[in-house]
Amino acid sequence: MVKTLEKLSTVTGSIDGNNVGKTLMHEHFVFGYPGFAGDKTFGPFDRKKALEISIAAAERAKAYGVQTIVDATPNECGRDVRILKEVSEKTGVNIVCATGYYFEGEGASAYFKFRNALGDGLKEIYELMLREVTEGIDDTGIKAGVIKLASSKNIITDYERMFFKAAAKVQKETGVHIITHTQEGTMGPEQAELLLAEGADPNRIMIGHMCGNTDIKYAAQVLEKGVYIGFDRFGLEGFIGCPTDREREALAVSLLALGYEDKIMFSHDTVNVMLGRTVVFPPALREIMANQHIARIFEIIIPDLKNMGVTDEQIEKIMIKNPEHFFQMK
């Protein structure tokens, strides 16, 4: 019988989830699309540079009072818990790492598809998540503090369902929290329904990228399941179907007016180090991408929201109280 977790796991040890403080719920210090490892001839990994960039990002967030950052990098996308630990140790910022796999279209789906064809993929995924949550990742002893799940645009595939079902089972046994990726803001209600049908606790689920769909009725439909939602792509505009930050802000204000201030959390989904060869964006897109950085919420979004009538108390709930309620261990 697995013992229910009593504290929130970070890359440097366990902390009281009630005291995470100002929190960014979905960022990536180091990330790579599966396949990057086969392109090392042109994209070798410079650990020293990656560490310097990651430390600078954490320090920039810390300058705005951020105490905790959730690194939502899936297992197959370059998750490097040793780098995360060093960043946390050098900056004093709590970093929560994840266990989980990316959605089928952009993840490394062949591995568990192959294993599932030969045996019980769901069982193996459950065993992996459970081990990484309760005992640690690789031989580091660093435990995942959240499970990261993802689904495709307009569908949760059979492959992806294995991960959702395994995650719900691990959560029931340990109390670990679940965060998700929704592709272009789709399948939010379906993700919540699937997890709840498998016995997951809505108070320990954050459906992510809900700012990718600016339909207020759709967002409310997700919130009515009792889960949290992430406005966690601020700064990512005009790219892969993303709305503008102005549209995200308008949706956030509307949801606050409807009384959902206790269920919304913010982040950026930044990728501070992209693994593989250097990505060269076209000039117009390069200008847009410059807006996605780890301080945008504090420098642009919060001032905008205040000008739109959002109160300091509501901002405090979104950035501090809601993450603390989400991460409290019962």
Image: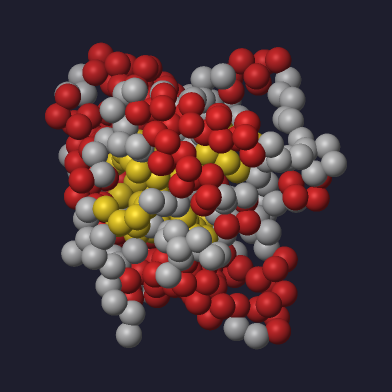
Residue 253 vertical placement versus 229 (above, below): above
For residue 104, side relative to residue 301 (left or right): right
Measured from the top left, where is residue 141 in percent x and y?
45, 63
Q: Residue at x 81, y 45 (%)?
A: 39
Residue 328 in sight in this render: yes
Quadrant occupied by the N terminus: bottom left
Q: Residue at x 28, y 28 (%)?
A: 65
Q: Which residue of the protein is positioned furthest toward the right in this rendering?
A: 41
Q: Which residue of the protein is positioned furthest toward the left in this rendering?
A: 313
Task: Give the total of numbered labels.
Answer: 0
For residue 292, side relative to residue 59 (left or right): right
Measured from the top left, where is residue 82 in percent x and y?
53, 50
Report the front residue among 97 and 186: 97
Quadrant occupied by the C terminus: bottom left
Q: Quarter of the image holding residue 174?
A: bottom left
Q: Quarter of the image holding residue 175?
A: bottom left
Report the front residue among 149 and 278: 278
Measured from the top left, where is residue 207 in percent x and y?
39, 51
Q: Residue at x 14, y 29 (%)?
A: 313
Measured from the top left, where is residue 286 in percent x and y?
65, 19
For residue 95, side relative to residue 21 (left or right): right
Residue 216 in sight in this render: no
Report the front residue among 105 and 169: 169
**How is the protein colored in the picture?**
secondary structure
Q: Residue at x 75, y 50 (%)?
A: 37
Q: Quarter of the image holding residue 9?
A: bottom left
